Image (cartoon, grey):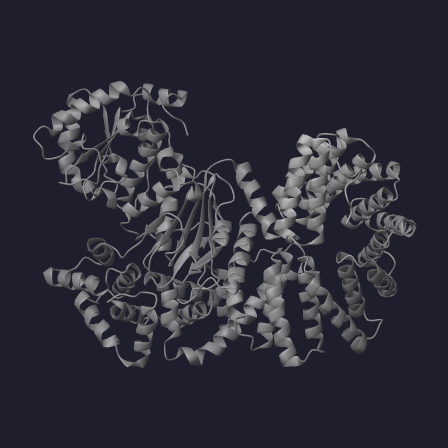
Amino acid sequence: MRLADSSSARASADAGADEVFFSYPRADRAAVLPLVEALRAAGVSVFLDESGIDEFEGITDTIRSALAGARLFVAYYSAVYPTRPACQWELLTAFRAATALGQASERILVVNPDPTPDHIQPVQLRDARYCTAGEPETVTRLVERVVERAAKSPGCLGDAIEARRPVWRPVEHVGSERFIGRVDEFWQLHHALHAFEYPATQDGASAGQAVVIGLGGVGKTLLVEQYARRFASYYPGGIYWFTSAASHAPEADGSEGVQVDVRAQFYQQVAAALALDTSGLDPVQVREAARRHLGEVGQPCLWIVDDVPGQLPAELVRELAAPHPLGRTVLTSRWRGYQLPVVDVDVLHADEAYHLLTTARVPAGPEEQTAARTLVQRLGSHALAVDLARGCLADQPGLTYAELLDQLADTKDGDAFQELVDDLFMQVPTDHTSDIAATFARSLQHLDEHALTLLRAAALLAPAPLPERLLSGISAELSQGDERAVQRADRRALSAAQRRSLIRQTGTEPPSWFVHALVSRTLTLQPEATTLRPTLRQAALTVAAYLMQSVYTPGKLDLADVIPHARTLVEELDTSESFNLLDSVARYGYESGQLASAAQDYRRLYDAYAARLGTDHPSSLMTRNNLANAYSEAGDVARAIPLLERNLADRVRLLGDGDLDTVSSRNSLAYAYQKAGKPNLAIPLFQRAVHGSVQLLGEVHPRTLASRNNLAGAHQAAGDLSKAISLHLQTLAQSVRALGEDHPVTLASRNNLASAYKAAGDLDQAIPLYQQTLPKLARALGEDHPNTLATRNNLASAYKAAGDLDQAIPLYQQTLTELVRALGEDHPNTLACRRNLAIAYKSAGDLAKAVPLYEQVLADHVRTLGRNDFRTDVARNNLAYIRQVAQGSPRHPHPPKI
């Protein structure tokens, strides 16, 4: 932002920029001209846009330049002024620049022609010192004040808002050109997001956060979209938009299943928006990667989570918020229980609703005006219902307002309509629900069959932005016709539905659409919906399963826009396609690091396969193995091991010892045993897995090498270091020869060999291997990858074992900082590194730093393991000992061992 003292601003002023920018709506031009002429007569140069920019026209470069070069901004703030987006943009520009200069009350003057200031926003401009039009001395006072303020305001406002728009992620929301009103809500939201910047109003618990609440269809999402577009200049770091589509049923609550869905979908969308490779990343790591991204951008951003279900726990709501202080967070929800600053979105003001309705056609005469007003009253000024009525009128030029009123009455027949009314009342509990339902039903009656088919297909999917590739695929699957002809029919159908406000485009790159949940419910409750549903759902399952196939290709996880709809389709498991799709959804969760979600999906799929096909069916066995692997990766070996033991026994019984699936099961079980600290059980299984892998895949297949590497690790865990080192040397040589020096398997093998040497006390071998491996891991996997951090911790431990604390301690400090950032405070690797650093400080004699770390280690163990775990007892005894050492009176020469 270039402000008043910038050379460019001075150059603009020197080039003849006007001192005053006069902002006004075209409707008030006659009242404005005498004020402008009086200022000019007093020698004040004034910029007045003679074209009078109307409702939705763009802002010209001339106006941008005039604003940047002006010293003062004068707004003719009539009741019409806040309804004109162009006026609001001009005011926003000036307000932001004046606020940055610390002179909002000095640089902006308001002329109020109305008797009260209630319509003026932001509230900072409601100042009694400002001029009130209609008073005899108004012109004189305005001229005096402008001259006085200009003398006190050197320099110009500056180019406060750049022409370049901020980046939207994952896609830009185009908003609605028919959006009207909500000026108070805009400024309430803006104040809530920025109030913490003013110490007197700061609320540390909810700084930079707000929740927008209201009934279904009342316009919460559109309000936030429009806020993001109008106030975009406040967020040069970007607009981030995520949709929580886990559940939108009116009775949905914060149950565990809903929480898992919300968390999984949110982090999948975050990863997709930031183009993160989430292989092996858990939610903490995804959030940390997002935090680093926002920090690297280094500018304020807007972080939006739309349609949040009710009754989520406070810790999950905190997870949904922007991960960096530069982010301002907006949630939208129908639930009023979240402890955040609230912006309450009610129905439209009657005049605003009337204006929205009549944008389709100006009422012809007093009777039509009365009918239009009655229609607005009957619909309770509900934004979506009024817009649907407008769509009916726009699509039928001969339809009058009175006729539409009569047709709504005719629509209210039959049990199906009453069911719709009852259903909508749960989401729009007003006295106008019956008329709103009639409007929804009536708005669908004049669509052709192709448009209705697309909307009915959308109604089966999640109430989230719908990627056009999914919608078009369903259409093609149903049509089985010429591809170009189907695409043309799709475009015509979507255009017709959009004209009637039944669907709206939410993004263009890639294209996506949105059908409101209330419209979807109307379609679902139509009498013919039950008959058509199986065919539509089968087509949707087929297309979604096809799109989700890419999840089985490493690195191909660009499916965040499809996942919410895939999840909705697999709420019922009734066909083979639904089973296959749920497997893809579970695999997506596993590959993207959402292990709790993956385990839940795999458990559900396994139970369904077992009930339908039996527990011995290959699909049941494969799914049980995947479920166990999800548990194992999440560290829950107590649940993983029994499943893997059963799976191995079943595969041996059904397939025999030599089958590749049996070998895979044996390796998975051995790995789980090793993670559980049972090397005596892991070793024989790894030996058999290595033998089987060699027989089936060869000596140097990556799976064979990985199994042999695991076998060496098990020998090391069992204390047989000679055998471990021999196997590690063999595996490393084969990995280098077959895969190359920088392959991840090779790097893991070299790290493990170094660890074996360190365990054997051969630090002259271990340290150079760690030093060689660490930079290659950082290049191949990244500085914050768990394997990189583990190797850095291992190198620090090797330095410490060699007595080189000057190198060990800084490396531990660096590693601990990065582990906390990348994996979180409670990750086992973080806890181990903090313990290692405490021991290193103790070894160096720096007890002032060691004691607080030992105290934190004990607190960590109590928090993560419980007070009675034996490891907590060890930490407690170690702390007691180090405190005695610090006091100079240890009762034991060494810490007591347990």
Observer-nearest residue: 300 or 672? 672
Does residue 285 lie above or below 97 as drawn? below
Residue at the location (75% across, 57% down)?
675
Quarter of the image holding residue 357?
A: bottom left
Quadrant occupied by the N terminus: top left
Residue at the location (72% across, 68% down)?
642
Observer-nearest residue: 696 or 16? 696
Can residue 210 be spotted in the picture?
Answer: yes
Count the marks.
0
Quarter of the image holding residue 767?
A: top right
Q: Residue furthest left?
A: 136
Q: Is residue 153 left or right of residue 76?
A: right
Position of residue 228 measured from the top left corner of the image (x, y, whole percent): 39, 45
Observer-nearest residue: 804 or 37? 804
Does residue 615 lie above or below 859 as drawn? below
Quarter of the image holding residue 766?
A: top right
Can residue 276 be spotted in the picture?
Answer: no
Position of residue 281 measured from the top left corner of the image (x, y, whole percent): 63, 51
Position of residue 557 measured from the top left corner of the image (x, y, whole percent): 61, 56
Position of residue 795 measured from the top left corner of the image (x, y, whole percent): 78, 38
Q: Is residue 73 left or right of residue 639?
A: left
